[in-house]
Amino acid sequence: DLPINVTNKTFCSTDWPVVIPNELFLILGALSFLENLLVVAAIVKNRNLHSPMYYFICCLAVSDMLVSISNVVETFFMLLIDHGVLVVRSSTMQQMDNVMDMLICSSLMSSLSFLSVIAIDRYITIFYALRYHNIMTFRRAMGIIVAVWLVSSVSSAIFIAYDSTAVILCLVVFFLSMVILIMALYIHMFALARRHARRISSMQRKQSSPPFASMKG
């Protein structure tokens, strides 16, 4: 086939856009749901994992499960509509799309928030090890979990209701702030671990070196 020249760019008429089938998204969403379900089941059944850190990990898995559920449900309805099995009005489709968007937005916000909470929890464990159980109590952990879910749900509803540039800017600022916070905490923890490793290696070298014996004639 002859190439087609459009605005100084050469395209071949045989080039076709890559189309990813909806069935693939459905399978990936189902697999992600099952993986996170196993994490939640393991934490719930094992009493040794009933601690604030694992509660936060469990909530993170639940957030990812909600993303998978919304993806599976949305893809399933799209398949039904594409194959003519289900006929839905445009207004109903818009409402369903808003619900799915709100669920996805809430899940993503809660996932980022719980990732930050897990990083803060690890930071307290390392730098305030002796006071950890006094700082991160069960009641305080439950309060953090409820606050994260509540703020994520309310914020996602507001973001969906008010579709504007300010909303997108707020989401970008929230995402960047969470990423910066997580990176700063883990860099500080890595620096402390590296400092301790150097101290341990220097102590081992001192212990392994032979003692200096002075002889007088």
Image (cartoon, rainbow, N blue to C red):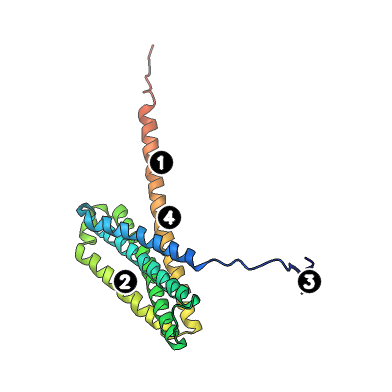
Residue 16 in percent (x, y) is at 66, 67
Q: Residues within 10 Å of mark 3 (few under 14, many from 20)?
A: few
Q: Where residue 169 sits: x, y (%)?
A: 49, 78
Q: Quadrant of the C terminus?
A: top left
Badge 2 marks a residue whose secondary structure is: helix
As drawn, the label of residue 5 is 3
Q: Nearer the viewer, mark 1 or mark 4?
A: 4
At 73% from the left edge and 68% from the top edge, which residue is drawn? 13
Q: Who comes first in sequence, dot 2 or dot 3?
A: 3
Which amino acid, by three-letter code, is at mark 1?
Arg
Left or right: 52 as drawn, with respect to 188: left
Q: Which mark is residue 148?
A: 2
Q: Percent from the top left, x then y, of residue 103?
A: 38, 75
Could you tell me which secondary element the residue under label 3 belongs to? strand
Whether pointer 1 and pointer 3 mark residues with C-beta atoms closer than 8 Å, the reply is no
Q: Kindly identify which numbered label has been placed on residue 198.
A: 1
